[in-house]
Image: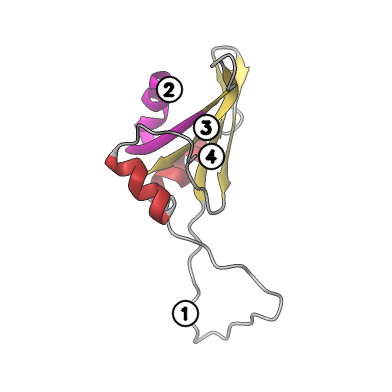
Amino acid sequence: EGDVICVFSQYGEVVNINLVRDKKTGKSKGFCFLCYEDQRSTILAVDNFNGIKIKGRTIRVDHVANYRPPQDSDDLDDVTKTLHAKGCGVKTPPHTSSDSLSEDDDVPVKKPKGEVCS
């Protein structure tokens, strides 16, 4: 987790990381989810890290919609508790085909969440 945070923190402050592990062995499954404090950091990380090699492994970095941290841990810090309540980042409304915007309408800005797979 520390290595992932160290690498990805060059684009902004990481406020939450969920390194997915096997429940029986505790070993990493090879992917994780992380949430930046600022959405612009997520965009920078996706644009700059997707497809690069780190320690001989090509990583995939992408956005995930409406990420929620896992709820099976008893030892949660205040930031993670807040993420449980609100989710990570701003929720994106579902897009419907009946939505149409005129030039005078405000266009909502979608805020995808950061996902890191390595």
Q: Check the image and report above or below for 21 versus 49.
A: above
Q: Residues within 10 Å of mark 3 (few under 14, many from 20)?
A: some
- For the residues carrying marks 2 and 3, which lies nearer the camera in this image? 2
Q: Which residues are magenta?
A: 1-19
Amino acid of disc 3: Phe
Residue of label 4: 115
Q: CA distance from mark 2 to mark 3?
A: 17 Å
**Residues marked 1 and 4 touching at CB (< 8 Å):** no
Amino acid of disc 2: Glu
**Residues marked 4 and 3 touching at CB (< 8 Å):** no
Amino acid of disc 1: Asp
Q: Residues within 10 Å of mark 1 (few under 14, many from 20)?
A: few
Q: CA distance from mark 3 to mark 1?
A: 31 Å
Q: Residues within 10 Å of mark 2 (few under 14, many from 20)?
A: few
Residue of label 3: 49
Q: Check the image and report above or below for 30 versus 100.
A: above
Query: Mark 3 falls on what kind of element?
Result: helix
- For the residues carrying marks 2 and 1, which lies nearer the camera in this image? 2
Query: Mark 1 falls on what kind of element?
Result: loop
Q: How many marks?
A: 4
Q: Earlier in the sequence, mark 1 or mark 4?
A: 1
Percent of width and height locating residue 116: 53, 34
**Picture disc at residue 1:** 2
Q: Is residue 16 left or right of residue 58?
A: left
Residue of label 1: 106
Q: Is residue 75 magenta?
A: no
The residue closer to the viewer here, 11 or 23, is: 23
